[in-house]
Each structure stands twice: as structure tokens, then as C-alpha cells.
Image: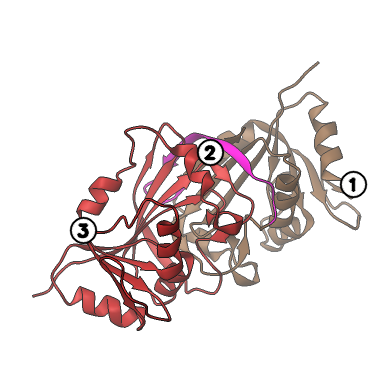
Chain colours: A red, B brown
Amino acid sequence: MVTDRKVILYIAMSLDGYIAGLDDDLGFLSNVEKDGEDYGYHDFTSAVDTVIMGRKTFDKVLSMGLGNPHQDKELLVITRNSRPSLSNEKYYTGSLKDLIKSLKAKDGKHIYCDGGAEIVHELLKNKLLDEMIISVIPILLGDGVRLFKDKRPEQKMVLVKSTPFDTGLLQLHYRFL
Amino acid sequence: MVTDRKVILYIAMSLDGYIAGLDDDLGFLSNVEKDGEDYGYHDFTSAVDTVIMGRKTFDKVLSMGLGNPHQDKELLVITRNSRPSLSNEKYYTGSLKDLIKSLKAKDGKHIYCDGGAEIVHELLKNKLLDEMIISVIPILLGDGVRLFKDKRPEQKMVLVKSTPFDTGLLQLHYRFL
């Protein structure tokens, strides 16, 4: 059976293109925190049953003390060196291309890429992403970790939707051609 | 008399943050060319009487064979080495800070920054921009000349407006706080 599982990047960046400041600082995200506003995150994750993320990003999330946010999903943590699993995460040391191919060969909901920059770069270099939902935070960070590194292939996109929120966050939804 | 002249960057960039590809290639802009659609450029330039741009960008524009697009404005070309003027442009070798200060001390319409990346970087480093109107082209260029270089100060912004066009171009309008 042919399935239509899409690999979707869902991420926040500053207007100048950083997903974190210097020293991986995520403090800028607090500029758009608002009670009762999740910017569509719940709806998005409801359409997802698999999450892939980089090992550094996974560790960063755990270090924030709120636990593993993807306990109800198949969670694949991409790493060069495997290690024992502490909850539902599976460490994956193979190629992203093979991983996406095998995930897409199975039935399932969409596949959520939860960062970070290294994984995004690998996915883009190999044209493995189907869609991107980018929440643009109204700030110039000035320096930090870029979402888009240099030396990738050109790729055309379709603007599916753009949604401004009253906090100034602007959510962009693009589909790759 | 106190005037309210604003320094406004009006520029196009790819979704991944480049204002030109490798070798200053501007070919990606043709993806959003459409008869009769100027993306608000005429209205914007009507509110402007002064243009500042970098020397390299000015030469690039001239090299495209369509002539100097700012003949009806006060045109200040920022350069390290002055040279004879060929039309209405004035070469300016001083500091951008002093230039903006003196322009704002005079009555007038808004001041349009027409790039390029070096001038934008200097303006941002010195917090000299008041607003930015960025037309985001639905493409990842993958490499090229970045609009936002590293090593700038953090600056918060207000999302004034976002306007999607049916070509996929998304025009962002931000004001600096």
C-alpha cells in the first residue's frame, strides 16, 4: 500500500534565521509565550506519530527539565554513537535517507522533524523534507545557531499558508516542489 | 522642526535568507515576476525621497542595463573610495551614523535603504533602521549572499503587516522597537 506520510519540519526561528542564540540560548521564545496559545502545536502533533530529532537537540530538551515531550510517539534520535534508551526514544546511527525511506514505506501518520540545525541540514541536503512550518519570532537575535546553513541545493517551494498572531509571531507553511 | 523621516529597508530575500545566490546571481527573483504586480514598490517609493545604497549594489544594478532606478530621488551611494558622479548619485565616504543623523535632521520623506548586505549590516550594527519590508521569495537558494550576517546586536521588532501574494511571495513589514 502506498502511504502519504510527509516529513514536516516544525520549528521556530528569529526573523534573522536563528533557531537559538549563542550558547544554544532559547530565551527569545519567551517573547511570544501567551497563555492558551500553542500556535497550532497540538493540532500539528495530532497528525504525527513519529518524531525524528538530533541527539544534541534531544539532550537540550531534556536539560530543560520538562521531560521527553514525545513519549506518545515513535521517537528516533539521530546520533553518531548509540546509547541506552531511558524512555521511548530509539537511537539511530544509520543514514537519514534510509531512515526516511523505511518510514515512508510503512503506513502511518506524518513524521515530525523537531530539529536541530544539523539534522535539518542533512534533510535539506538530501531533499528529504516535504513541508516546513516555521514560526518566525519578531526579533533579530544577531547571532547564534542558523536554521539554514550554506552549501545546500536550491529548492523551490509553495507557500501553503501564512498566519500572523497578535504576539507578532508569524507562522509560515511551505511545501517543497 | 522635528521630522519623522524613517529609514526603511525594502528588499527581497529567499526563504533561507539570501538576497543573492552565489556570484551575486539575482535569477531567483524571476520566480515571482508577474505582469502588473509590483508588490507595492510604486507606493513605497512614492513615500520616499532619499535612497541610500552600497556601491557594489549600485554597480550591480547599473550592470543589469536598466539604468539608475533612483533618478528622481536624492541618491547616496556609500563607498570607501569616492568617484565622479555619472548621474544624480552622490558618493558618500563618511560614517552611516552621521549620514542618517544629518538626513533625519532635515525635513523630507522617508529614506529607502536599497541594500546591499554590507550596508544593511552596518545599519543593523548601529541600530539605524526604523522599519524593514522584506519580500520572502518561496525558494531555498542553498547558498549565496546573506541579508543578515552574524555579530549584530539583538533587536526586538513589531510585526506591522504580512501580505501573501498568489505568486507565493510573502511580504513582511516589521518596525523596530
The chain containing the residue under callout 1 comes to B
> What is the residue that sits farthest to the top in this orientation?
B1
- Element class at badge 1: loop
- Element class at badge 2: strand
Decide: is A102 above or below B66: below
> What is the residue that sits farthest to the left in this orientation?
A1
Report the side of A56 relative to A52 (left or right): right
Q: Which residue is mark 1?
A: B94
Q: Which residue is mark 3?
A: A72
Tag nearer the camera, 1 or 3: 3
Residue at screen point 15% across, 74% down: A106
Which of the 4 quarters of the picture holds residue A60? Answer: bottom left
Decide: is A16 above or below B126: below
Q: Nearer the viewer, residue B141 or A47?
A: A47
User: Quadrant location of the C terminus of chain A?
Assistant: bottom left
- Both on one chain, marks 1 and 3? no
Q: Which residue is mark 2?
A: B173
Q: Write the start and end of the magenta stretch as one range.
A: B151-170
Q: Residues within 10 Å of mark 1 (few under 14, many from 20)?
A: few
Q: CA distance from mark 2 to mark 3?
A: 39 Å
Q: Is the residue under label 3 in contact with that under label 1 (CB below 8 Å)?
A: no
- Both on one chain, marks 2 and 1? yes
- Element class at badge 3: loop
Please, what is the three-letter code of the amino acid marked with disc 3? Answer: Asp
Q: Earlier in the sequence, mark 2 or mark 1?
A: 1
Please, what is the three-letter code of the amino acid marked with disc 2? Answer: His
